[in-house]
Amino acid sequence: MKIGVFSTFMSPLATPAMIRDFGRRAEGMGLESIWMGEHVALFDKNTYGYPGSKDGRIPVPEGGGMLDVTATFGFLAAATSKLRFGTGVALVPQRNPIYTAKEMCTLDWLSDGRIDFGIGVGWNKEEVEACGYRWEDRGARCDEFLEVMRRLWTEPVVDFAGKWVKFETMRLDPKPIQKPHVPIIVGGYAEAAMRRAVRFGAGWYGFNRDPAGTKEMLAQLDAAFAKAGRKRGKDFQIIITPPVSMSVDAMQAYAEAGVDRLIVNLGSQRPEKVDPRMKEIETLVKMAA
């Protein structure tokens, strides 16, 4: 099982020097990848709370915010040579699909094929609407946008006539280094997310899942594959970020559940917290070796 780290870099703690040093340290200790979450803006009031915290709010430092995924991964790619980078997750229904296709294939090109495109439909209604889209149809829009991107990554010339996207004889180059395209890793727990993983995914990503919860979701995933007349193959990756409180003893349970990549949450980015946490994660890397 491969070990990576989830760290959504936030200002003012995540300075250029901190991010560069963190990436080189992660690569030097044998971590397989760095994953980042995405939110372009936060709101003082939300219809739905953030599911990853008890109070429903994203823990952002006072006066700071989340850094952009694309720019940060470009910066990290230049500072490293082996680490993979994963979006955990990119909020496809509120993104422009043509710009997103260009950003991801450019990152793949410049990093020499080290990008995983983790995707989801999101939980923040206000953010989706502020980006110019409707909340209620975000699932269907996500599927159409993914189809647009997949075709732009793999076909020399594309015509497309969908509900949200229409164009003729479009070319998008360079094509991704990875074939057939940048791997799409689908996140989410609803039945629609499972169908999306079967249709588009090279893998499924679960966040804050313990071993029991992982097994439960994989049963649902396999049911979705069966409903589509297929069986989950060995090349379909299962990627999990466990709870921050996960003990090293739980790693074997994840391996037995069929997890391919364990993306451990860094937690706080305060300097006095990062060093001891990275030492804990390094222990997992050595155990998995």
Image (cartoon, rainbow, N blue to C red):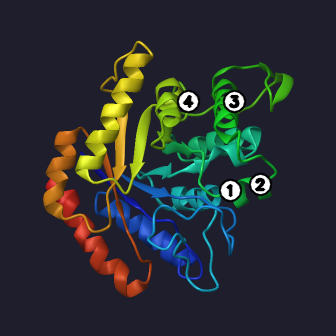
Kindly identify the amino acid type of the residue bearing the numbered disc 2.
Glu
Position of residue 255 measured from the top left corner of the image (x, y, whole percent): 19, 44
Q: CA distance from mark 3 to mark 2?
A: 18 Å
Numbered badge on residue 144: 3
* Mark 1 neighbour class, 10 Å CA radius: few under 14, some 14 to 19, many 20 or more: some
- Residue 223 in which image quadrant: top left
Tags 4 and 1 touching, CB below 8 Å? no
Q: Vertical placement of 19 versus 202: above or below?
A: below
Label 3, secondary structure: give it: helix
The mark total stands at 4
Q: CA distance from mark 4 to mark 1?
A: 30 Å
Kindly identify the amino acid type of the residue bearing the numbered disc 4.
His
- Nearer the observer: mark 3 or 1; the answer is 1
Q: CA distance from mark 3 to mark 1?
A: 19 Å
222 sits to left or right of 97: left
Q: Which residue is mark 1?
A: 125
* Mark 3 neighbour class, 10 Å CA radius: few under 14, some 14 to 19, many 20 or more: some
Q: CA distance from mark 1 to mark 2?
A: 6 Å
Q: Which residue is mark 2?
A: 129
- Residue 61 in which image quadrant: bottom right
Label 4, secondary structure: give it: loop
Q: Vertical placement of 274 versus 283: above or below?
A: below
Name the residue located 75 percent from the left edge and 38 percent from the top edge: 98
Report the residue that reaches farthest toward the front. 47
* Mark 2 neighbour class, 10 Å CA radius: few under 14, some 14 to 19, many 20 or more: few
Tags 1 and 2 touching, CB below 8 Å? yes
